[in-house]
Structure formats: structure tokens, C-alpha cells
Image (tube, rainbow, N blue to C red):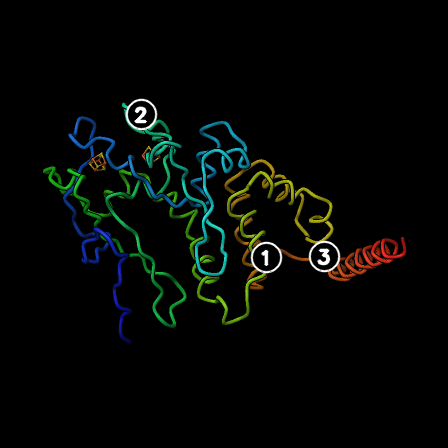
Amino acid sequence: MNEPKFDPPKGPVEPVKLGLDDSIQFQCRKGIACFNQCCQNIDIMLTPYDILRLKNRLGLSSEELIEKYTVPFEMDGHGMPGLKLKTRDDSPACQFVTDEGCSVYEDRPAACRYYALGLMSMRKKDSPTDEDSYFIVKEDHCLGHNEPRTLTVREYRQEQGVDVYDELNQEWRQIVLKKRSAGPTIGQPTERSFQLFFLASYNLDAFRRFVESDAFQQAYDVAPDLMKTLMDDEVELLTFGLRFLKQMLFDEKFIAEKPDALEKRLKSKREREARFKALEAGRQGT
Ligand code: SF4
Ligand code: SF4
């Protein structure tokens, strides 16, 4: 089988595909002449785990973080919601950059950790798993490429702490790729599926309330121990949310549904519709 063509994103990208054991020459350090330059004109897409880390770092709820520090964008041509880091009002600089560097450094997003590496995930035809490859992003302002230090991609990833981010974001990236590639070929995605995607991907506090709600508990069979874990552990809740999304979007069964849940949902939908019709009829009669 032919390997898919390596087609890295356009821009200042070196057209060389790198693996984990390939070496790169790069070092970013305090005191370098270009210090902070890369944070002055940002375009950073956020992942679910980025949002979790940032909201806790700043002591905000996920709603507050989304409101204050993100801007929405469409990840595809069909309305799949994405979030980017919001810039300052008066410039394209990041709100977190200070003269001393990044003020949220230990919790900076995955894209900031990767720079000046880029990550690309591809799936070979008939393969069940994605294959990651890397490439160098070489922008004129970044002098880190001239620093006399070489290390492997694997070492760079470890140094920057991207492993834990990738592990937690991998399931989400798969959902994004699958939803994107399904696109209009299986019909227009529904508004409801995008709302669920937003809730489970970005708004973890609202997703927790949803899981705690009577409506969820009447529909799904979640053991008390697991429910306690989900309420206490945000990483577990995020992982559960992404699996819930797969179940809702692609019908991949993960969470047991209560046997009469569908019937109850249909009944309550019929009752809602009947109430709405009665209300309409009342309005027209007045
Ligand atoms: S989060 Fe930190 S590293 Fe990332 S762009 Fe902002 S200041 Fe720079
Ligand atoms: S070396 Fe590159 S990544 Fe580091 S501060 Fe300079 S521009 Fe940013």
C-alpha cells in the first residue's frame, strides 16, 4: 500500500517529515534576543485539556475562561465549533505574555509547548490507529534555530511536557477528524451534535452538571463508584465526556443506557410537543 502523501500545513514549514528519533537543532531560552517574539502575534487553537489546565491555573470556571480568554471559530466548513486563544484588545499579542515571559508557563497550551515543532496526525487506509509525524516551523523572527543544541523530537517532547497533553487530546483529535471527514456525506451535522461537542470538549463544568442531572441519570446506567470519580476528577470527567461524544455522534457504545430510557425520552418529547401545540392553539384562539 502506498503511504499517504506528506502534506504539511502551508507557511514557514520545513517540508521534512520527522519521526520521534530524528534530531532537531533548537533551543528557546530566557535572554535570547527574540525572547517573547512568538507570543506577540498569536493564532493558537485550544484543545480540551488546554482549557482544563488554564481554567484551573487562573481559578476560573470553564464558562469564565471561555468568555474571557477565547474566541470561537469554525473548525471546518460545516460549523464544528473550535476555540482559539483571545489576543489583547489593542494588538495580536497573547494576553498572558509579560516582560518575564509566559505568565501561565506551567499550564501553557499544547501548541505553545510544541513550537517550533508542528504535529500532524494521519491514518493510513485500513489502519485502526493514527500515525503522528512532526515537522519544523521556521519563522524569521525565531532565533532558537541558530542555538547550538541538538536533541531528538522525543527528547524535545519530554522537555516540553507535551506527552500528557497528547494522551488526553488524542481521543478528541480522532473525534474531530472523524466528524470532519464524515461531513456532508452522511448529511449535515445537527445543531444538537455541535452543542454536545462544545459541551464535552470545552465546557467541562457545564458537562459535569449535565452528568449530575436527573435527565442524564435516568437515561444512562453509571455505577455509583464511577459517578463519584467523575464528580471528583476532572481528567476522568473529560475522558468520559469524549467517550460520551463518540457514543452520541458515531453510535460507538461505551455507556450503558437504561433499558426504558429511549421510551421515556420519546414519551417526554411527545408530551413537550403536545404542550407546545396546545400553547400555539391557545395563542391563535386569542
Ligand atoms: S500562552 Fe504563554 S507561551 Fe503561549 S502564546 Fe501565550 S504567553 Fe506565549
Ligand atoms: S527562540 Fe523562538 S520560541 Fe523562543 S522566544 Fe524566541 S521566537 Fe519564541
What residue is shown at x 65% (from left), y 44% (from top)? Answer: 210
Q: Which residue is mark 3?
A: 258
CA distance separating discs 2 and 1? 39 Å
Residue 191, labelled with which disc? Answer: 1
Amino acid carrying label 3: it is Lys
Residue at disc 2, CB closer than 8 Å to ligand 1: yes
The tag on residue 98 is 2
Q: Earlier in the sequence, mark 3 or mark 1?
A: 1
Along the viewing direction, whichever of 6 and 44 lies nearer the viewer: 44
The amino acid type of the residue labelled 2 equals Thr
Q: Is residue 257 above or below residue 83?
A: below
**Quick one: 281 or 210, which is closer to the camera?**
281
Q: Nearer the viewer, residue 198 or 175?
A: 198
Name which quarter of the figure residue 25 lies in: top left
- Mark 2 lies on a secondary structure that is strand
Identity of the residue furthest to the front in this view: 286
Distance of label 3 from label 1 (alpha carbons): 25 Å
Amino acid type of the residue that numbered disc 1 sits on in the rendered structure = Glu
Horizontal and vertical percent for residue 218?
74, 51
Q: In the image, residue 138 lies at what x, y percent?
A: 18, 47
Q: Nearer the viewer, residue 184 or 169?
A: 184
